Amino acid sequence: MKQTQATRRLGEQLREKLGYILLFEVSDPRLDLVTLTAVEVAVDRSFARVYVSCDASRYDEVMEALASAKGRIRSLLARSLDWRVTPELDFRIDRSTDEAERITRALENVPATLAIEKDEDGYPIADAAQEAALDD
């Protein structure tokens, strides 16, 4: 969805309103520890894509809870927004945190060959002790 400065500002406003609604007005325990990471709003404000983040083991549970509460969330949103149209909500899982965690784990497993000092061409630099061992 194409984002302009105006739609980004509207998305931030919508994210704040949705956060308040999920925190204080929807009492579903399946929605505990759910974070709204981003909201993309259509230019005509009729559609909003809402990205949520949670523990990877709870994806299905959280999406089911959001689907069942979508109507209530939208009606509460209509009361709190001063927009002419209340946007249709499309909830999606934000998997960027999963990707960041995967990269972090990969960086922790650094191969031993990366610790060896190399010259400007990428070849290992042999120190005097290694050269003496090779000569014998």
Image (cartoon, rainbow, N blue to C red):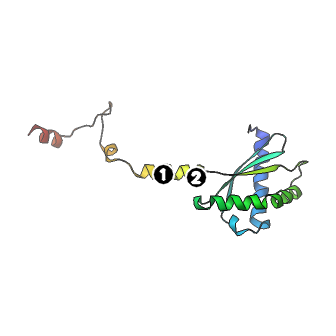
Give, as a three-letter code, the residue at label 1: Thr
Q: Can residue 20 be spotted in the picture?
A: no
**Residue in view at x 87 percent, y 55 percent:** 78
What x and y, as percent, mark residue 53? 64, 56
21 or 46: nearer the eye? Answer: 46
What x and y, as percent, mark residue 101? 52, 53
Residues at marks 1 and 2 touching, judged by CB atoms closer than 8 Å: no
Q: Can residue 78 be spotted in the picture?
A: yes
- Residue lying furthest top: 121
Q: Dot 2 surroundings within 10 Å: few (below 14), some, or many (20 or more)?
A: few
What x and y, as percent, mark residue 95? 60, 50
Q: Give residue 104's mark.
A: 1
Answer left or right for 112 relative to 33: left
Answer left or right for 69 relative to 59: right
Q: Dot 1 surroundings within 10 Å: few (below 14), some, or many (20 or more)?
A: few
Q: Give residue 97's mark.
A: 2
**Residue in view at x 73 percent, y 39 percent:** 1
Answer left or right for 102 relative to 9: left
Give, as a three-letter code, the residue at label 2: Thr
Query: Dot 1 lies on which element?
Result: helix
Quarter of the figure with the C terminus:
top left
